Amino acid sequence: MKLLRVREVKFLGCATRIVIMTIDNDNLMNSIIASLGRIDTISLDEMPNIDLYMDQLTTFMDERLKKTTRHPETDKILTKTMINNYAKNDLLPPPVRKKYSRDHVILLIFIYYLKNILSINDIQTLLGPLNDRFHRSDDELNLSRIYQNAYELQSEALEPVIEDLKKKYARALETFKDENISDEEKKKMQMISFIIELSYDVYVKKLLIEKILDNVTETKAAAKEKSKDKGKDKK
């Protein structure tokens, strides 16, 4: 593998000082970061205006979200079994006369992203308030308005995420510089440093989400118990 010895490189316009840099790692990271800007999310305007049968629903989700998978040629976006399981676990209201509405599509998109990091129970807790607003009218806070808010927040969050990735990558390139190891080993160790830092970031955020949802569950359980006690007192 060819190596490039430099003192400074440009990483998406960000100057990064290093001792040894591989062309492959630099190109890989630039390619990955650039691809984040091409994530194809689904806007409200792109959602069908008519209710869909099961096959139409799975086809729509597959066509729109296939590129977000790790292995687009084999990974499944949504299957009939998945949809039925979501309904059984109270994540998704049942269809109306075998048809799924825009509200169903919105919930399924949320589930698709959340299932990669949260358990079914946690998703139930999080989406519970959304299910309560299923098929609300346009003059109320409905799922379309909630989804639009999330869509806008996601768009605004991408640039800070990319900046954070560049900083983490630059820090990783500063590791193992003084170790008496080959250039190839140094490159591997720096990539490991980068992945570990990313993983820790994911771990902390996942832990935070779980703590928040645990608090929601505990608060709801306490309120239910308090309501029971009040009922007993009245008797």
Image (cartoon, grey):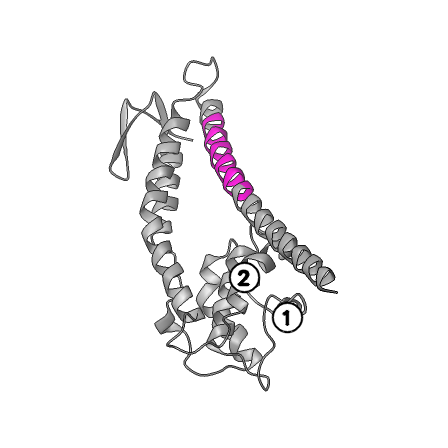
Q: Position of residue 31 (x, y in %)?
A: 36, 45
Residue 38 disc label: none
Q: Residue at image x 47%, y 19%?
A: 182
Tell me the residue that label 1 is attached to.
87
Per the rendered image, the range of residues in magenta is: 188-207
Expressed as whole percent of the image width and height from the top left, the position of residue 4 reads 33, 27
| Residue that badge 2 annotates | 127
In the image, residue 146 sits, relative to residue 34, either above or below, namely below
Q: Along the line of sight, which residue is nearer the eye, 30 or 2? A: 30
The image shows residue 32 at horizontal and vertical percentages of 39, 45
**Element type at mark 2:** helix
Residue 2 found in image quarter: top left
Q: Is residue 38 visible?
A: no
Tell me if residue 124 comes above or below residue 216 in the rendering: below
How dense is the environment of label 2, judged by Cα within 10 Å: few (below 14), some, or many (20 and up)?
Answer: some
What whole-number distance in Å separates the C-alpha atoms at marks 2 and 1?
A: 13 Å
The answer to whether residue 202 is magenta is: yes
Query: Which of 234/206 is in front?
Result: 234
Q: How many marks?
A: 2
**Quarter holding residue 173:** top left
Residue positioned 40% across, 62% down in the render: 41
Q: Amino acid at mark 2?
A: Leu
Amino acid beneath label 1 = Ala
75 relative position to 6: left or right: right
Q: Quadrant of the C terminus?
A: bottom right
Instruction: Name the element at disc 1.
Output: helix
> For the view shown, which residue lies furthest in the bottom direction?
97
Q: Is residue 102 left or right of residue 29?
A: right
Q: Quadrant of the N terminus?
A: top left
